[in-house]
Image (spheres, coloured by chain):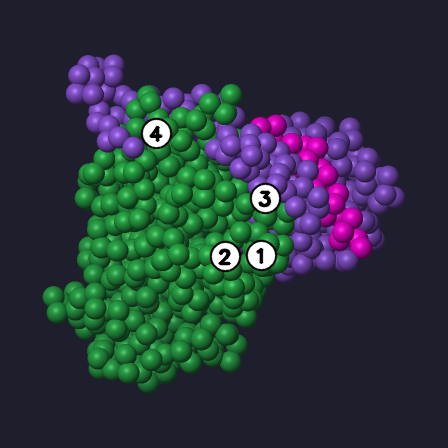
Chain colours: A purple, B green
């Protein structure tokens, strides 16, 4: 290998920035690769682009859930929809008091009780979480992938809840009040710089307050540029089918489904390895 | 002794137990406020710190903050305590211990010998009465060196975890981030992926992919897929080429239950990794992540403050001789560390406490978009951690983790802190970077339009 030094002649205003030829790979990933460098540091353009993205993500956290639009979307799909609220009064309290975001307020509890649902197979809670945008843009689409499959299995779906200022565990009191065997929570994940619209799905067998995180399964990053609706729905159905058989969720319910993802056998598209040197799958 | 107190003028501040005193003496943070155990005001906090400074270190061996009978971590701490190592500081109070640590006579050798005699509660206590400069200065004196395919934690070195996460584990996306990181001189701590799912088959595939890349380019570094320890064990059973076994850990038995683990399971994980014998220069095979607030988040905090519980997680870590341990300091969110100021302090506390206990501490210098923090805060923490001799930080393209949706340090950030503080990569990796013509003899990146040949070839395959 040669010890190459930077060309001392390249010090005019345009060339103090070293660009990266692998920048073109960014068509395959949203990761901020090939940003180039000024010395060893981030050049001005990608530095300021980052600042803009951060400002947008900060704003996304505070975007309120459009309950009217969401109620309409849910009511057009389900017989029974109920609008609920956690014990966190507003976004400020929600951010500082996760405990309140995990509980339903009195009125919501009464609402659920008054519905007189003794039991159902699946309870569905659609929760704003940290990104109302994820709910606005993706919750209904994902449900369209799931619900026909639930029906095909003969599962009863309880009243669908739309919950404001909720955390993941809010699905526990919801599921308990509806006597659900399985609880599903669709929640807006915290916005990333490149993904202000990421939807998370959490599954809990026998939802009841006090369940811990290791008793849940999570499917993350559901959005058009992340985990596709198809792939997410397949995985959720796999988990629910397995759970129905084994009556557990979480760590004990390993995801051993046949890999059916963009990962494939890991060699497709892995340009770092020559074709013949990549491992063959077992 | 029942209760602790300190008089301020005519006012007597009383603290009914050691855990109350510890909580009240903790510099302000949202997680302790959320737990309802923080000092109600600033004077109470200062009085608690004065009272804590008077507490003999030996008191921490008598009054348990988390009951011995109820918690296997407390039993690990107490049963594993080394009285001979403790002897040289056994007569000191917390306040005297701070002076001792700052003194010129105490160097890295003394601290290494002392480490088995210290408990997490002792080091958490002294950290509470330290300023940031104390946390940096004493942290810098500690040296915890570990090895697998390279050597991490040597003086004057700062390593990075290359974190090529992709939301769908797309091989091209992952490979692109690995290429980016290597050509920016990152990846000596580990090339470590957070997978999109816990699917065992996917984990096995990712492990093979990383192993093949490391072998093809002869990179003196190790790989890890950060999945649950049970998944890692299953992957090893299926023959996956596993360098390091990862697990998130916490400082109470209950919080670890929340993660679906206990000490016996971690032992199983370590045994499985050791059975493969894949290390070339060392055999530290575990990788742990921690973070203040995890016990409260699991409702298993026993009304103990989060900084002390975090230090107890390092007692778990040191039991398994890990290669890497890092606090993911700003990841868990503003309900535990509200803003940049709280994140900075916590990062430096965690680094010091881990190092004093003999744990090879790194730090994920990071924040989320719902915290009151920004890049400037991370620059301050990164620079201070570099000065404090932190073993490693994260490296990710442009600070943006597109899988976990948070911001951590970038490949460029590592170059910045290495340049400003004269730090270098792990020696074996540094040699590789020079051989590949990625860096010059001074550790500066020299990659320009014409890439080092193996990577230039790789890039042609991408199209």
Question: Quick one: label 3 or label 1, which is nearer the N terminus?
Answer: 3
Residue under the image location 34 percent in, 77 percent down: B60
> Residue B204: where, in percent of width, then height?
59, 48
Residues shaded magenta: A221-245
> Residue B162: where, in percent of width, then height?
41, 42
Chain bearing mark 4:
B
Q: Looking at the image, is B348 positioned above or below residue A184?
A: below
Identify the element where label 4 is drawn: loop
Does label 4 lie on the same chain as label 3?
yes
Looking at the image, the residue that sits furthest to the bottom is B1
Q: Residues within 10 Å of mark 2 (few under 14, many from 20)?
A: many
**Mark nearer the viewer, 1 or 2:** 1
Is residue B6 rendered to the left or right of residue A249?
left
Are discs 3 and 4 less than 8 Å apart at CB?
A: no
As measured in the structure, the alpha-carbon distance from the residue carrying label 1 to the one carrying label 2 is 10 Å
Q: What label does residue B429 carry, if any?
A: none
Are discs 3 and 2 less than 8 Å apart at CB?
A: no
Q: Nearer the viewer, residue B30 or B277?
A: B277
Residue under the image location 74 percent in, 45 percent down: A238
Identify the element where label 3 is drawn: helix
Q: Residues within 10 Å of mark 1 (few under 14, many from 20)?
A: many
Residue where numbered disc 1 is placed: B236
Residue where numbered disc 3 is placed: B205
Are discs 1 and 2 less than 8 Å apart at CB?
A: yes
Q: Residues within 10 Å of mark 4 (few under 14, many from 20)?
A: some
Residue where numbered disc 4 is placed: B452
Question: Quick one: label 1 or label 2, which is nearer the N terminus?
Answer: 1
Chain bearing mark 1:
B
Q: What type of secondary structure mainly makes up the magenta span? A: helix
């Amino acid at each position: 290998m040669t010890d190459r030094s930077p060309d001392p002649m390249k010090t005019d205003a345009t060339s103090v920035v070293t660009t990266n030829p692998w920048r073109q790979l960014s068509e395959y990933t949203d990761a901020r690769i090939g940003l180039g460098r000024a010395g060893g540091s981030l050049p001005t353009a990608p530095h300021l682009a980052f600042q803009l993205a951060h400002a947008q993500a900060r704003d996304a956290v505070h975007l309120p859930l459009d309950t009217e639009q969401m109620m309409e979307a849910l009511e057009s799909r389900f017989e029974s929809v109920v609008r609920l609220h956690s014990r966190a009064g507003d976004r400020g309290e929600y951010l500082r008091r996760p405990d309140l975001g995990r509980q339903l307020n009195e009125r919501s509890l009464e609402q659920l009780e008054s519905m007189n649902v003794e039991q159902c197979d699946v309870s569905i809670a659609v929760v704003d979480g940290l990104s109302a945008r994820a709910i606005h843009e993706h919750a209904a689409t994902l449900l369209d992938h799931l619900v026909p499959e639930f029906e095909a299995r003969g599962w009863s779906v309880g009243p669908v809840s739309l919950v404001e200022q909720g955390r993941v565990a809010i699905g526990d009191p919801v599921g308990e009040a509806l006597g659900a065997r399985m609880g599903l929570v669709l929640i807006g994940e915290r916005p990333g710089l490149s993904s202000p619209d990421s939807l998370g799905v959490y599954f809990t067998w026998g939802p009841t307050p006090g369940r811990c995180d290791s008793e849940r399964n999570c499917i993350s990053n559901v959005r058009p540029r992340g985990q596709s609706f198809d792939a997410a729905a397949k995985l959720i159905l796999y988990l629910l089918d397995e759970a129905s058989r084994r009556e557990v969720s979480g760590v004990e319910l390993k995801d051993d489904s046949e890999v059916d993802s963009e990962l494939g056998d890991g060699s497709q598209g892995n340009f770092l390895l020559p074709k013949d040197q990549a491992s063959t799958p077992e | 002794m029942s209760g602790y107190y300190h008089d301020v003028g005519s006012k007597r501040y009383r603290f009914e137990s050691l855990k109350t005193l510890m909580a009240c003496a903790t510099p302000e943070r949202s997680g302790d406020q959320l737990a309802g155990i923080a000092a109600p005001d600033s004077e109470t906090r200062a009085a608690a710190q004065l009272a804590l400074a008077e507490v003999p270190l030996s008191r921490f061996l008598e009054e348990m903050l988390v009951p011995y009978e109820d918690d296997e971590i407390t039993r690990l701490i107490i049963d594993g305590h080394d009285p001979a190592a403790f002897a040289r500081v056994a007569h000191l109070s917390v306040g005297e211990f701070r002076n001792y640590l700052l003194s010129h006579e105490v160097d890295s050798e003394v601290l290494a010998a002392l480490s088995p005699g210290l408990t997490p509660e002792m080091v958490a206590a002294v950290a509470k009465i330290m300023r940031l400069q104390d946390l940096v200065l004493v942290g810098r004196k500690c040296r915890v060196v570990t090895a697998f395919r390279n050597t991490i934690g040597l003086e004057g070195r700062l390593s990075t975890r290359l974190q090529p996460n992709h939301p769908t584990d797309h091989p091209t996306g992952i490979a692109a981030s690995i290429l980016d990181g290597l050509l920016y001189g990152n990846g000596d701590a580990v090339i470590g992926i957070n997978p999109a799912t816990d699917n065992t088959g996917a984990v096995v595939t990712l492990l093979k992919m990383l192993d093949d890349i490391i072998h093809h380019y002869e990179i003196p570094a190790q790989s890890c897929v950060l999945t649950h320890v049970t998944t890692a064990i299953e992957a090893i059973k299926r023959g996956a080429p596993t360098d390091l076994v990862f697990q998130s850990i916490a400082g109470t038995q209950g919080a670890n239950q929340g993660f679906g683990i206990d000490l016996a399971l971690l032992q199983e994980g370590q045994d499985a990794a050791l059975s493969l014998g894949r290390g070339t220069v060392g055999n530290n095979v575990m990788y742990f992540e921690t973070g203040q607030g995890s016990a409260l988040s699991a409702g298993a905090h026993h009304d103990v403050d989060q900084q002390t519980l975090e230090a107890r997680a390092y007692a778990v870590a040191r039991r398994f001789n890990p290669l890497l341990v890092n606090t993911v300091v700003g990841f868990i969110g503003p309900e535990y560390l509200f803003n940049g100021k709280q994140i900075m302090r916590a990062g430096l506390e965690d680094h010091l406490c881990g190092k004093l206990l003999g744990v090879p501490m790194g730090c994920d210098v990071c924040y989320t978009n719902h915290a009151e923090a920004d890049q400037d805060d991370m620059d301050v923490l990164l620079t201070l951690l570099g000065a404090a001799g932190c073993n490693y930080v994260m490296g990710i393209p442009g600070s943006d983790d597109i899988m976990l949706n948070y911001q951590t340090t970038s490949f460029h950030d590592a170059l910045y802190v290495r340049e400003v503080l004269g730090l270098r990569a792990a020696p074996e990796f540094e040699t590789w970077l020079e051989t590949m013509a990625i860096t010059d003899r001074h550790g500066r990146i020299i990659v320009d339009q014409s890439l080092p040949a193996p990577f230039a070839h790789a890039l042609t395959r991408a199209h």
